[in-house]
Image (cartoon, grey):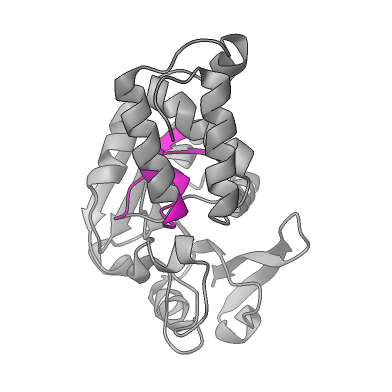
């Protein structure tokens, strides 16, 4: 990019750079990064197209475009991702929340807030736990074997009543009434887009040779009387993982018609 540009010219040059770099949605990406560089919402770009780009904004914008062409996800550059209508901080230590995960929220809200404790397993950014805590107006527990700093900042930002625990699946808690989760479910060796495979934390993505290693362990730890709801790989044979002591095993599809959420209750 060249200095001394107005916002319209900066966008035009950025789209060309991103197109050449093979980046998906180059126009949207250019707008998001430019808005981030000038500290304004995207609509500002179109209301003030002739505004000159400051030197500092130009330096940031050029660096971020280079990072995006190298494969770094836009969300890790802006450190923001929307989920359930709220903005969450994200970074390389946590998985970027996806729209598909909102189906876990939908299923949990449909099931209703249980009388006992609710725990979000593998909380990552905290988006599931924080969303349910705010939607239900109650305390939700969250556990992760990885760093909890990002999730704690998100909970503080949204003033969400979430209590965090460091631990492996359900080993850190007892007596839960509902477990919600978006565990790792990608088989080892699967080919992923570089934005995912090269940048997002492997521990939040991969789960053994068939992708079901974490799901098997989690299902085994769920106590009697507990409702389990979680995101799944659309290719997985989830029903085969639930034994005769489970009722109401149900698979819900996402908007693309792919199996996406499993729910079941242990007797």
Residue 222: image location, x then y, percent: 42, 71
User: Is 95 inside the magenta-drawn segment?
Assistant: no
Q: Which residue is at 58% across, 14% downward?
A: 49
Q: Is residue 205 visible?
A: yes
- Residue 228 is left or right of residue 202, and the answer is right
Q: Would you say 22 lies left or right of 88 here?
A: right
User: In x, y percent, where is residue 63?
Assistant: 34, 40
Q: Taking 215 as reference, is 261 above or below it? A: above
Instruction: Please say whether residue 243 is visible from this viewpoint.
Output: no
Residue at 27 percent across and 36 percent down: it is: 153
> Who is closer to the viewer here, 170 or 116?
170
Q: Position of residue 177 (x, y in %)?
A: 44, 56
Q: Nearer the viewer, residue 98 or 44?
A: 44
Instruction: Give the residues in magenta.
Output: 69-93
| Quadrant for the N terminus in the image | top left
On the image, which quarter does residue 138 sit in?
A: top left
**Total marks placed:** 0
Q: Nearer the viewer, residue 42 or 56?
A: 56
Q: Is residue 236 above or below residue 56?
A: below
**81 in magenta:** yes
Residue 177 against residue 87 in the figure, above or below: below
**Front-most of residues 117 and 64:** 64
Position of the C terminus, as image quadrant, is: bottom right
Name, please, the residue furthest toward the right: 257
Can you give x and y, in whole percent of width and height, for residue 215 in the image?
A: 47, 76
């Amino acid at each position: 990019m060249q200095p001394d540009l107005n916002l319209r010219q900066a966008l035009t040059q950025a789209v060309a750079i991103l197109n050449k770099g093979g980046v998906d949605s180059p126009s949207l990406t250019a707008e998001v990064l430019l808005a981030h560089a000038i500290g304004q919402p995207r609509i500002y770009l179109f209301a003030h197209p002739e505004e000159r780009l400051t030197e500092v904004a130009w330096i940031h914008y050029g660096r971020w475009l280079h990072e995006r062409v190298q494969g770094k996800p836009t969300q890790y550059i802006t450190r923001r991702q929307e989920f359930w209508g709220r903005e969450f901080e994200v970074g390389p230590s946590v998985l970027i929340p996806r729209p598909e995960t909102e189906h876990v929220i939908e299923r949990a809200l449909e099931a209703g807030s249980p009388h006992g404790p609710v725990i979000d397993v593998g909380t990552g950014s905290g988006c599931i736990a924080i969303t349910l805590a705010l939607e239900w107006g109650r305390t939700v527990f969250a556990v992760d074997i990885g760093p909890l700093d990002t999730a704690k900042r998100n909970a503080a930002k949204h003033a969400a009543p979430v209590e965090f625990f460091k631990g492996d699946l359900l080993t850190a808690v007892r007596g839960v009434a509902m477990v919600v989760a978006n565990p790792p479910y990608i088989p080892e060796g699967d080919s992923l887009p570089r934005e995912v495979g090269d940048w997002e934390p492997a521990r939040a993505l991969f789960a053994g040779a068939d992708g079901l290693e974490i799901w098997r362990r989690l299902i085994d730890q769920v106590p009697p009387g507990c409702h389990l709801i979680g995101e799944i790989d659309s290719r997985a044979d989830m029903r085969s993982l639930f034994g005769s002591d489970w009722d109401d095993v149900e698979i819900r599809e996402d908007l693309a018609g792919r199996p996406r959420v499993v729910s079941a209750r242990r007797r």
